[in-house]
Every structure is written in structure tokens, then in C-alpha cells.
Image: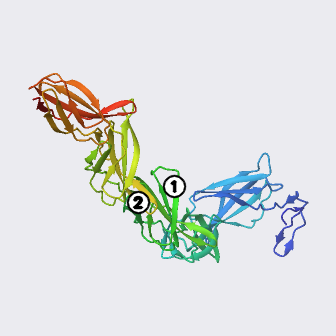
Amino acid sequence: MAGKTYKYKELSLFGNLYSDWSMDQPEITVLTAPVPRVSSKTSSYVELTWENTAGATSYSVSSKRNGSPKWTDNLSIVAKPASGNTVKTTIYMPFGKGNLYHFTVYAKNDSSVSPMGQPIDVFIPFSGPANLTSAFNNGSIDLRWTPVEGADGYEVFASINGSYYNSIDHVSNTEYKFDNLALGTDYRFKIRAYKEIDGTKYYGDYSSDTGYKYTIATPSGFSAVAQSTSKITLKWNAVPDAAYYELYRATSTTSTNWTKIGVYSTNTANNSNLTANKTFYYKVRGYKTVNGNKVYSDYSSIVSAKTKAVPQVTGLKITGGTYNSVNIKWNSVPGATSYHVYKGLKNSSGQITWTTHGVYTKTSCALKTLVTGNTYYFKVQAAIKENNTVNYGSYSTSVNRLLKFAKPVIISAEGVNSSSIQLNWKTVNGAVYYELYRSTKKTGGTWTKIGIYNRTTVTNKSLKSKTTYYYKVRAYKSINGTKVYSDFCAPEGATTK
């Protein structure tokens, strides 16, 4: 019995006669066979370890391939370790992948060898199946991989949402269909080959993993088209499984501040109340609520559209006016709902200060109660109102006018006697006074101011008889301490009697 120490003596047998017993022989201890363990294995070596056997000074390893009748002895001869209680050896040889080998270890010393211990089985594993792929196909995930030479079948493992891999099936071919997918779930898979020997399955290494996250597909066919100055229409292809779509907007493709502008149950949307003549960027994603949680698709590609500009007003011109009013008109702008009219005056630095005069729905207006003597500037801006948004076009080219009194018109100039001439002119609207000038020449002479009047009929006296005199007049009014004049009228002549 292994581990026991025995004393023995001998006798001889000759035919039917026995010899006398010999003297006692030295004691013999039957060594215990080690129980090896596999610490590492590949197709080129197997590393075994076992615990040191009492009384042993060395060990030998024997092996055979499963099904072979013969053991190969002394594959490795190992001396007892100088220290420690663990013995280790490595057997180098070309082991075939997918094959089962049996190993046993004998303990030895100078006087005895242990009996054969219980052999251990060592399966040299297949390499993991190569080229494992996964593809979504009509509600299921199709797995495919390259066959492993010598394998009897394959074990399929699955991990759901990052959980541990669990064996889900054994198959004999190199394809597998995984059904009953749950939306919003991340599936991962790996495969290992096996060989069945004497009713026991021996497994190879795992393949690399592959996977598919079953989620909402990314919206495709996304487009944006400007419909007006404040509205952009967006469309995309409908996505199976998506119940709703979230639409986002930004003012640049690199923006970190995307604004969610709405949730839609259809694959089209109108974005209104936008600023005219401005580019907006959009992206969309689909989603569906599963077990109280929203399962989203990835965002679509980014698209952009520029709202239409409100056209500039053209054709602005002055069509008339008075000493304190101006009439203007301009060309109509398609789609305009109103026109904003501005007037301006130059300040002391020569810059025009603009103020809003009024808002009109027609293409002309009269600007009244203006101050005579000022040069006024005018410009017009079209506006388009859609829903609650008003967008404005650029300003028109400005026009200007100096406001002044009309020139007086002399109605009559007549000599009434040898020393007097009577003059009569039309009243100038807005004017308060009139300056009257006289000369003896119609052109090229010296003009003398003979008076300031607040009436339109004047008799010029103390003149020479039978002499022709010429007259001109201008109107004026003091405004804020400054006299504002009209132009002079055309000279008119008269002769004393």
C-alpha cells in the first residue's frame, strides 16, 4: 500500500520444494503517487505542478493521447526541489489543438517507484473562432464565424447591457440567430468551439466579442428649406420603432448650445418666428418610451437653411412738398406688410440723427410739420410680419431736401406818378416778412434793400421822374432766432411818369 513501510524476506521455489527463508531484507516504503495539476497549457507545451511526495527523490511524467493504447514514459524527469513543497515541470512537444491527452506522474527513490496515480485529462483547446460578426436582420441578430477545424460544435454566449456572459445555446454550424430583441438593449456575443470525447464536451478558447445595440435607427434624408423670412420647413425619413422625434436648432455647426425646439409625431416640422436672412442649423433624433425610459436614436447629420431676406426698398424719391412738408414715394416690396419711414437731421459733427416718422401700409406718405430752413434726410425700410415675428429689410438709399419758403411772385409793378412806383406780390405761405430790393439795372447792377414789410403791397416813393427801376423780393421768417429766407423772385421793372 502506498505510503506504508514494509519488511520482507525471500524464499526460493524449486519444483514443489521451497527453500528456507532468507534473512530479513532492508525495509521498503511504498511511495505515494503524486496528483498533478495543470497550471498552463498551449499547443506547444503543458505545465504540470504537484505536491512533493514524502520519500521521493525524483519524479517522471508519462503521457498518452486519448485512444492510444501505449503510454510514453519519462517525458520529463524532475528532481525533488531543494526547497519548497511544490514540484513543477514543463513538457514541450507539439500537442494538437482539439485533442485530449492523459498525464500521470510517478514518484521515485533509489529503492522504489510509486504505483501509477490517477491520470489527469488535459484538453489542448481550440483557438477562439475567428471573424465573428453580428448583423441586425428584421428584428433579430445574425451571428456568423469561421469554422474551427476539428470542432464538433460551438457554444454561444451572450451578455445583456454589460452583464456577465451566459451560455445561451450549443450549435453544430457556424451561424446563429438571436431573436426576441428588446428595444434599448445592448447585446454582446462570443463563441467557443468544443469537441465531444467519450460523452464529455471539451471547450476551446473564446472568440473576440461582437455586439449590436438594438435601438432606434438614426433618421436619414434630413433636409431644411427656407419658406419665407421667418419660417424653415424640415423633413426626414420616417424611422421604424420611433414614436416621436426631437428637433434641435443652433446657430453654428460647432455650437455647444443646441436648443430643443419641439417634439413631433410625424417626420416633418415647420420652424417659425425666425430672424430673416440668417442661417440656422438643425439635427433630429427619434425615440420611443420603453418601460418608462426613453430609448433614443443617434442624432441625424446636421443640415442648415438660411431664411429669406426682406428685400431692400428701392425707388425712393421726393414727389413734392411745401416750406414745412415733404411728400415721398417708393416701389413696393413683395410680401411687405408695412413700411417704416425715417427722417433725419445732421448734428453738429455732421452725422445724421435718425428718428422714426411713421409706419405705413402704402408706398407713399406726406411728412408734415417739418421745420423750415432745415435739410431733412429720408429713408424707408420694408417689414414682413408672419405670426408674431416682424423682420426688417435693409434701409433704402436716402434722399434729402432743404425746406424753404416759396419764392414770391410780383403780380404788378407800376409807376403811379413822377416819383412813385407801386408793387404788389403774392403772399408766401408761412412767411412773416418780405425784404424788397431795388436797382436801376435788371442785371449786373447794385441792389439796394429799401425795406422790410409784413404786407404784400408797397409804394416806393421819392424816385426820379421818367426813370426805370427794377425790383425783387424775398420772404422770410425768424425761426429759433435765425432768419430763414426764400429765394429772390425774378426782377420786375417799372417806370415813373
Residue annotated with mark 1: 258
What residue do we see at 18% from left, 26% from top? 438
Does 252 sit left or right of 460 as displayed?
right
| Contact flag, marks 1 and 2 (Cβ < 8 Å) | no
Q: Nearer the viewer, mark 1 or mark 2?
A: 2
Neighbours of disc 2 within 10 Å: few (<14), some (14-19), many (20+): some
Which of the 4 quarters of the picture holds residue 98?
Answer: bottom right
Can residue 132 be seen from the camera position used here? Answer: no
In the rendered structure, which amino acid carries the disc numbered 1? Trp
- Residue lying farthest top? 446
Residue 82, quarter of the rendered image: top right
Q: Position of residue 495 (x, y in %)?
A: 10, 30
Across and down, in percent, residue 64 comes to: 63, 66
**Left or right placement of residue 397 versus residue 109 in this view:** left
Front-most of 243 and 214?
A: 243
* Colouring convention used in this rendered image of the protein: rainbow
* Residue 137 versus residue 257 in the image, above or below: below
Indicate whether 306 appears above or below 288: above
The earlier-in-sequence mark between 1 and 2 is 1
Q: Quadrant of the C terminus?
A: top left
Left of 496 or right of it: where is 16? right
The answer to whether 107 appears left or right of 274 in the picture is right
